[in-house]
Amino acid sequence: MRYNALSVIKNGLRGNIDWTRAWRDPEPKPAYDVIVIGGGGHGLATAYYLAKNHGVKNVAVIEKGWLGGGNAGRNTTIVRSNYMMPGNREFYSFSLKLWEDLSHELNYNVMFSQRAHINLVFSPAQRDALARRYNTMLLDGDDGEWWDRDRLKKRVPHLNMDGRYPIEGAYVQPRAGTARHDAVNWGYARAADALGVDILQNTEVTGFVRKAGRIVGVETNRGEIRAEKIGMAVAGHTSTLAAKAGLGKLPIESHVLQAYVSEPLKPFLDAVVVFGVGHGHFYISQSDKGGLVFGGDLDMHNSYAQAGTLPRYTDVMGCAMNILPATGRIKLLRQWGGVMDMSMDGSPFIDRTEIPGLYLNAGWCYGGFKATPASGWCFAHTIARDEPHEANARLTLSRYREGRQIDETGGGPVPNHH
Amino acid sequence: MLRIPCPFCGLRDHAEFDYEGDATVTYPPLDAPEDAWFEAVFLRENPRGRHREYWRHTQGCGAYLIVERDVTTHEIFGAELAHPGMASAMEGAA
Ligand SMILES: Cc1cc2nc3c(=O)[nH]c(=O)nc-3n(C[C@H](O)[C@H](O)[C@H](O)COP(=O)(O)OP(=O)(O)OC[C@H]3O[C@@H](n4cnc5c(N)ncnc54)[C@H](O)[C@@H]3O)c2cc1C
Ligand SMILES: [Zn+2]
């Protein structure tokens, strides 16, 4: 069923009883051409683009829980492309372009809102570093602007301009913003399903089926399922699953990142505001339901727990009070954590592996939501054609051995520095 | 809140400590082949379960500790001084 304004009105008048399921709940087939493990945004987008761009429609997405139960439904939904390093630059720039047409592409409103991403600047050194970054973006055809204090104050009237860290201005990407994360997952799921993709929820991959050095299938709690090619897109659970596949150790550590949502408010903030000074790190936006959605740094210690600890919580609240003191009396409604696949240089990999038939998509750190469309596009390309798309040609797994790390922050080979 | 039993200071909140990474990594000799260095610098076991890791009691005695912790349940099985000389001196004192 195609969604449009007319169908909303018609169904509304009929009491909304005629809507059909957005995607099927099929029984697993014994075999597929491609299996994608992980029903987060990346896995679902990969399945969609396999069917749409490459005509590979005999595809299953295997998800151990429910769609969007992982990071795809736990993130703070910031979408931007203010990356500088070759590798990330072309990839995130491509992703932002895909976002701009995503609702039409999927016939599903993903509520992509280009409300501007405002990176606050507190010192001349920070301004210089960001000038270099945003000029690099401009050279590449992306957008970026310097906003002085007056312009900033007009747009974000509640900012504490002269607090503990006086604000000098901001570097801004106007085309950046937020999207509704669940809608992205559901939109890709529905569009992939319509092209014939089987989405298998509550199906956990517990092992791999091997034949003559190749991986030819997966073992699951619903039985063995075969496929010629298998792609892994399991974010924070990559190391555990890779070990089962025999991939050996990877350049990843799993860490927990928390998110916080306040009670709903009237319009308060119509942009994404980011604060980073010293050890403080904080980002905030307001959702369409009115809640303030915000977060900060990792908890910093390795974790597979989808829940965070108190010190980071208090630190993030301190940051909120520092730049937006008006938030002080607002009640917090919800808080949770997600397990991040922190890579050794802070950048992802979308690549083939040394095991024939097995493909790997991981290392998203805490910036993989914005990557969803391009990640799916490039992973589908890599799986279907056995070679990378130009946007993921540098996002290889071998780059660490070759000394070609894509280290955007200069943090070194320490996962929690990125 | 995790609580880490520092051998010097006793049971302390983990907010007093800095996490310093995987303690199972051993760095090879300087002239070791590149492969050994690649593995030590870039590859991690990243287990879902018991993990040996360094924590520094930055806001306490300052010592580097090796803590064994379950990274899913956060259960802490013990902490010892990372420096073998310090560890044996502590044993002598006890
Ligand atoms: C608190 C928080 C804030 C964030 N904020 C942002 C942000 O503002 N902007 C941004 O760009 N990014 C952000 N991110 C990062 C982003 O959410 C992730 O990088 C991205 O969602 C990862 O890709 P995914 O959607 O495919 O992962 P996931 O949704 O985690 O998908 C992986 C799926 O694999 C499944 N799985 C695992 N093991 C198995 C198995 N054995 N068998 C079957 N299925 C399995 C899991 O259940 C899960 O559903 C944030 C993340 C968190 C946690
Ligand atoms: Zn101590």
Image (tube, rainbow, N blue to C red):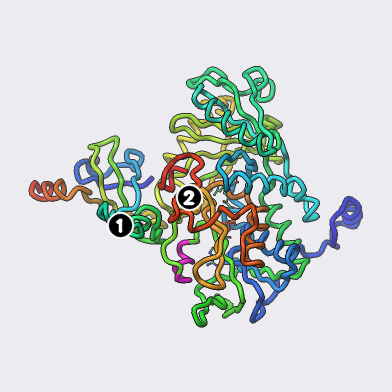
* Chain where mark 1 sits: B
Q: Secondary structure at mark 2?
A: loop
**Whether residue A200 is situated above or below residue A123 in the rendered picture:** below
Q: Quadrant of residue A31?
A: bottom right
Contact check, label 1 and label 2, Cβ < 8 Å: no
**Whether residue A350 is situated above or below residue A176 in the rendered picture:** below
**Whether residue A290 is situated above or below residue B27 in the rendered picture:** above
- Of badges 1 and 2, the one in the foreground is 2
Residue in front for this viewpoint, A228 or A195: A228
Q: Please report the bounds of the magenta region as a residue range.
A: A239-246
Is residue A231 highlighted in magenta? no
Q: Secondary structure at mark 1?
A: loop
Q: Which residue shows up at 56% across the image and 61% down it?
A: A351
Q: Is residue A44 left or right of residue A219?
A: right
List the residue tagged with mark 2. Answer: A404
- Magenta span: predominant SS is helix
Q: Quadrant of residue B32?
A: bottom left
What x and y, as percent, mark residue A288? 71, 40
Q: Which residue shows up at 67% across the image and 29% down it?
A: A268
List the residue tagged with mark 1. Answer: B24
What x and y, as percent, mark residue A50? 70, 65
On residue A303, the disc is none
Amino acid on which the number 2 mark rests in the picture: Arg
Q: Quadrant of ligand 1?
A: bottom right
What x and y, as percent, mark residue A37? 58, 67
Is residue A245 highlighted in magenta? yes
User: In the picture, which quadrant includes the N terminus of chain B?
Assistant: top left
Q: Looking at the image, how many numbered discs can be counted on the residues?
A: 2
* Chain where mark 2 sits: A
Amino acid on which the number 1 mark rests in the picture: Thr
